[in-house]
Image (cartoon, rainbow, N blue to C red):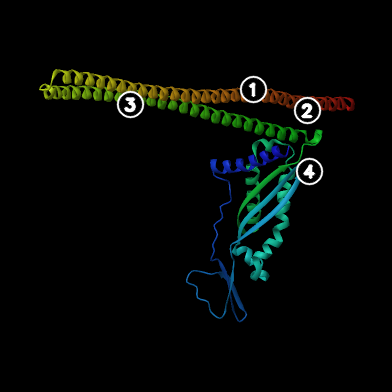
């Protein structure tokens, strides 16, 4: 219940701020004069008092008394409903004595502001107590304390101006609530209002938390899906790159083979031309040796090409295996997050069922209150009939 009380206190503060932003506050607009001074003139038996005018030059027969603007902070704590509600009150008063007030208090001109605070502090506190102790029901819990703050501030300013003291007042109320006690008929309305407000805050908080969790989880799932799509694109690009490299290597080998064959044919013709002058036995032997050499080189080229082809195939196979393994890992993680999302939704549905039960309890309390009020009304009616 402490967390609920904190939420309600937060609502009072934020509600007051929102109200200040939404409409012009009803405050007493005082026009202060920071240079206001009272001048006493005394020549022989004659004397005179007046406000210091512009261009005033002080003479030996003048005595000047400043009437300064001062800030006055009054704090107060009031307990309501048998201690169930505590309200911290702060009055921030900016005030200045008028000429009329100064003329009525000539004997304390040198310390006039201290006299004002000493004289009217208890009256202001009594005014605040009277306003707050009249809060007999809990309707203000639903509406907030903004209207009450304005009413108190206006009442303080009115009281001071009636005493010829210019003032501008800002009232701040900070309510806090204790743990819910056993419901008593006298304060049942207050308890129900606070219970409603606490329930509304908890429900809104759960809704917002669930929405944020859903958004975060959906963002993670979307991010994972994009990662998987990018991984698939990268893998496809790598496969195309490997295929292109293999094709290029094959073309290079085929070109090299063609060049070797052409070179061999050239060398063969040159050699044949050279040895044409030799005897036929040497020509046949040389041709046989060249043919054997050609076969060896062809076998060597074929072996090299086979090794290259096998190596490229092995690399492609390994790449496909690694890609498949990463894809399985991403799919497993994606399924896990989707399952977690489903579990969160189930948990949310369970909490909603619990809230429905609590809302029913509140409605039963309200019905019981109405029943007791009706029963009391019937009893009073019967008493009136008996006395009639």
Left or right position of 234 against 121: left
Q: Quadrant of residue 348?
A: top right
Give the alpha-carbon distance from disc 2 to disc 3, as whole Å: 86 Å
Provide the residue designation for mark 1.
346
Q: What residue appears at the point 56 percent right and 28 percent down from the top-left corner?
A: 214
Give the alpha-carbon distance from disc 4 to disc 2, as whole Å: 22 Å
Q: Nearer the viewer, mark 1 or mark 3?
A: 3
Q: Earlier in the sequence, mark 2 or mark 3?
A: 3
Where 300 sits versus 15, above or below? above
Provide the residue designation for mark 3.
245
Give the alpha-carbon distance from disc 2 to disc 1, as whole Å: 35 Å
Provide the residue designation for mark 2.
369
Q: What residue appears at the point 71 percent right and 62 percent down from the top-left corner?
A: 118
Describe the element under mark 1 as helix, strand or loop: helix
Q: Given the current orientation, which residue lies at the most extreme right position?
A: 386
Q: Earlier in the sequence, mark 2 or mark 1?
A: 1
Q: Nearer the viewer, mark 4 or mark 1?
A: 1
């Amino acid at each position: 219940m402490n967390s609920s009380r904190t939420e309600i206190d937060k609502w009072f503060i934020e509600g007051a701020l929102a109200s200040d932003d939404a409409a012009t506050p009803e405050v007493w607009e005082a026009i202060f004069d920071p240079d206001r001074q009272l001048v006493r003139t005394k020549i022989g038996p004659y004397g005179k008092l007046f406000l210091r005018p512009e261009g005033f030059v002080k003479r030996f027969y003048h005595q000047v008394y400043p009437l300064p603007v001062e800030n006055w902070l009054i704090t107060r704590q009031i307990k309501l409903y048998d201690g169930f509600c505590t309200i911290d009150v702060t009055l921030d008063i900016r005030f200045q004595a008028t000429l009329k007030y100064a003329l009525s208090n000539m004997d304390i001109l040198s310390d006039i502001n201290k006299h004002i605070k000493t004289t009217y502090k208890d009256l202001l506190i009594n005014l605040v107590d009277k306003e707050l102790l009249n809060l007999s029901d809990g309707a203000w819990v639903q509406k907030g304390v903004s209207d009450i703050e304005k009413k108190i501030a206006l009442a303080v300013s009115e009281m001071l101006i009636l005493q010829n003291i210019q003032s501008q007042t800002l009232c701040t109320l900070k309510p806090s609530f204790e743990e819910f006690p056993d419901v008593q008929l006298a304060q049942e309305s207050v308890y129900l209002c606070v219970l409603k407000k606490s329930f509304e805050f908890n429900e809104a908080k759960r809704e917002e938390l669930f929405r944020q969790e859903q958004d975060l989880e959906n963002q993670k799932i979307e991010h994972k899906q994009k990662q998987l799509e990018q991984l698939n694109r990268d893998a496809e690009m790598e496969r195309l790159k490997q295929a292109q490299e293999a094709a290029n290597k094959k073309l290079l080998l085929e070109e090299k083979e063609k060049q070797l064959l052409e070179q061999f044919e050239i060398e063969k013709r040159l050699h044949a031309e050279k040895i044409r002058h030799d005897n036929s036995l040497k020509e046949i032997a040389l041709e046989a040796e060249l043919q054997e050499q050609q076969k060896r080189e062809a076998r060597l080229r074929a072996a090299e090409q086979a090794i290259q082809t096998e190596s490229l195939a092995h690399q492609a196979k390994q790449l496909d295996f690694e890609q498949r393994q990463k894809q399985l890992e991403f799919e497993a993680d994606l399924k896990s997050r989707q399952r977690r999302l489903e579990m969160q939704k189930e948990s949310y549905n369970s909490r909603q069922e619990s809230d429905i039960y609590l809302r029913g309890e509140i409605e039963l309390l309200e019905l019981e209150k109405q029943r007791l009020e009706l029963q009391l009304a019937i009893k009073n009616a019967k008493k009136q009939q008996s006395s009639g």
